[in-house]
Amino acid sequence: MSESTEPQGLPRRLLADPEMVLACAERDFARIFQLAARKGGFHPSRIARACELTPSRVGEVMKGRPKITNMGVIERIADGLRIPGRMLGLADRKWEQPTGRRLDPPPKVEPSRSPWTVPEARVGTELDDILAIAAGARVTPNVVRSLQASIEDYWRRDDQHGGEALRPAVIGQLRYVTGIMRDTADPNYRRSLHGIAAELARLTGWTYFDARQFNTAQGYFTEALRFAREIGDRPFIANVLACLSLQATYQEQAQDAITLARAAQDNARLDGGTPRLLSMLSMREAFGHASAHDQEATHLAITRAHDHFERISTTDDAPAWVQYFDHTKLTVDTGIALGQLGDATSAEPLIAEALRAEPTTNLRGRAFHSFWLARTQLQRQELELACTTATAALDLAAAVESPRVVAHLQEFRQLLKPYRGHPQAAELADRITGSAR
């Protein structure tokens, strides 16, 4: 193939590869070049031409020496190989604009408005400090606490209503925090601001994941990895890898899901690994094995998750962002993994128990778990009960902006096809079809 007909950049499938995602997040250019050569067909001389480097320099980098730290060179590599800027911790590149190849661009925040939307005032939130941030005030402990409180509020709203309406505010706040980081010389706030930016990037990625916009979600998860890595926050790195693992499960990339979940556990253990965090990460691995229909590996991962959970003490020091993983969440996730394996007899009572204990305010979670309960009931030939449960899931989904839940309900409609002669099943299938219009 002549040089003029060579593709402009790395294949999209390679940019979505978990190994490449991690290599970019760590700016490990030796690994990036090796993957480009091995999986993308980019031989060293071609990398050199694309990135305006000499072939000998590329060869040395691929051997691990020297490290590339010069921002000009990093930008040339991003442009030459068409690696999205966010994957390397850079600003969006010019070729990523809507006229280029970028997928699912995040919505723009209107410049005439405040850079982010102030969340609903609630007990514990210092509204004056939030407004001070919008006005460009200097960083103070109260400002940091206000930012952290707003993240808690965003997650609460995301659980209740989905993240579609929140996303522009979260993106705006993320960009504003990164601006504060650039303008703040005080090292006392470096770790806090990087941690806040990492959480906001993960939340943004999660809202895109819930919207099934997986390419954009991965970009924000990668950004979260970069922020966490810059302050050496291994537990949060593990948390983001767990998000990527779950996304891989949804994309039916079972082996990638397992690899990412195991990498997450390795990162958590390097920092001591609290029992609650390791329990959650083991369950993410179980999801990957269940997606691969590996009975033995799934049961082993579930057993590890329960063993870790039993070691949680009354003085649990797990990070705040994993406190959601309580006994109810462990129970329902176990049921879902078993349901994915086809063991409906074991799965149904677990999911039903969790639904009874789950907060009624968590509308998306209840819709999602109701779908799984209906699916296990259908597997057990409990058709009328399954239709009743799925109807409840459909009603909950109507109050939540979550394409992920809608996709599950469409999946349930397909499962009802053999029962279209049953009036209740036919009516439900028609309702599900109508809800997607």
Image (spheres, grey):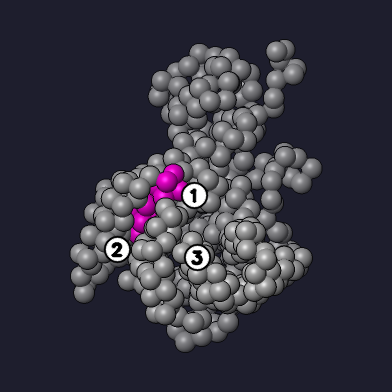
Task: Give the quarter of the image for residue 331.
Answer: bottom left
Q: Give the residue furthest to the bottom.
A: 123
* Residue bearing mark 2: 276
Residue range corresponding to the magenta coloring:
280-293
Q: CA distance from mark 3 to mark 2?
A: 36 Å
Picture residue at 55% right of the left edge, 69% below the top: 383
Residue 66 coordinates in the image, percent (x, y): 42, 24
Instruction: Establish if 197 lies above or below 253.
Output: below
* Residue bearing mark 1: 249
Q: In this image, 96 relative to 208: left or right? A: right
Q: Give the residue furthest to the right.
A: 99
Q: Residue 248 colored magenta?
A: no
Residue 161 coordinates in the image, percent (x, y): 59, 74
The foreground one among 323 and 29 is: 323
Camera sees residue 95:
yes
* Residue bearing mark 3: 381
Amino acid type assigned to the residue bearing label 1 in the image = Thr
Give the mark, 1 or 2, whose residue is nearer the N terminus.
1
Amino acid type assigned to the residue bearing label 3 in the image = Gln
Picture residue at 57% right of the left edge, 25% below the top: 40
The foreground one among 49 and 294 is: 294
Determine crowd level at label 3: few under 14, some 14-19, many 20+ residues with C-alpha closer than 10 A.
Answer: few
Q: Quadrant of the C terminus?
A: bottom right
